Amino acid sequence: MHPAAASLAALALGATAIWGATDGLQALTAEGARRLAAARDAPRMPAVTVETMTGQPLALPAAGGRAEVIEFVYTTCPTICRTGGDEMARLRDRLREAGLAGQVRLVSLSFDPETDTRALLADYGARHGADGRIWTVARPDPADLPRLLRAYGVTVIPDGWGGYEHNIVLHVVAPDGRLSAILDIDDLDGAEAAIRAVLR
């Protein structure tokens, strides 16, 4: 193939990849495209049963007309998951103050369920003030994990040191089990607005 033709073909492939990753250039990043797709398409999240920090089974998504906010963590994370736990505690307090606590469930869901024992889940919950009523810490069955990560669009990459590189955001799930918003972990205004919107 002529070098110029090869360059044009490579450019076309690259442009196609960028177009797909950015939702037709509507978003600047793949993460932005993921958020746009959630808001636009409201995909239904898989129904699974997870184990909470108290050993109780918990059905996801929430039932009984409640909304849900899910973050994905691993309990031994030394950095971003701690921030995530702090922000979930702030969101819990905010929902209480707004009178929404009974209509929303917060779940910190482990993406390392084989390492995150019930004791580690409970310790993570105790460190951040998750009491199991409004907010709980849980782990899925390892067999369900790939499907959950795919559905929620969570990227997890082993860092070679026993930890993981991962994105941490708030996933707002409507009472009908559809993912309606993906927000930065510290966007509590956005989270409250998204929760109110799905509870209407």
Image (cartoon, rainbow, N blue to C red):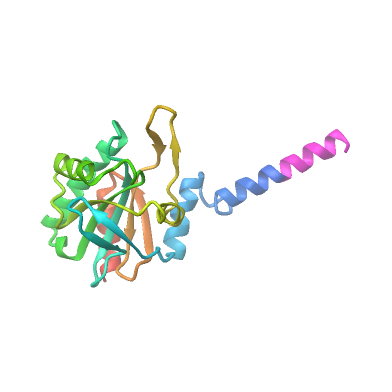
Q: Is residue 143 left or right of residue 120?
A: right
Kindly identify the residue that appears in the image at 63 percent across and 47 percent down: 17
Quarter assignment of residue 185: top left
Q: Is residue 170 left or right of residue 136?
A: right
Image quadrant containing the N terminus: top right
Residue 57 point in image, percent of width and height: 24, 61
Image position of 94 with respect to 115: above or below: below
Q: Return the residue nearer the eye: 50 or 43.
A: 50
| Span of residues in magenta | 1-12
Q: Return the residue nearer the eye: 144 or 83.
A: 144
Residue 162 point in image, percent of width and height: 38, 30
Kindly identify the residue that appears in the image at 35 percent across and 67 percent down: 177
Kindly identify the residue that appears in the image at 61 percent across and 50 percent down: 19
Main secondary structure of the magenta stretch = helix
Residue 68 point in image, percent of width and height: 27, 60
Q: Is residue 103 left or right of residue 140?
A: left
Image position of 40 with respect to 126: above or below: below
Q: Is residue 48 left or right of residue 120?
A: right
Q: Return the residue nearer the eye: 47 or 94.
A: 47
Residue 173 point in image, percent of width and height: 33, 62
Q: Residue furthest top?
A: 161
Queried whether the magenta region covers residue 37, the answer comes back as no
Kindly identify the residue that appears in the image at 25 percent across and 49 percent down: 188
Q: Residue furthest right?
A: 2
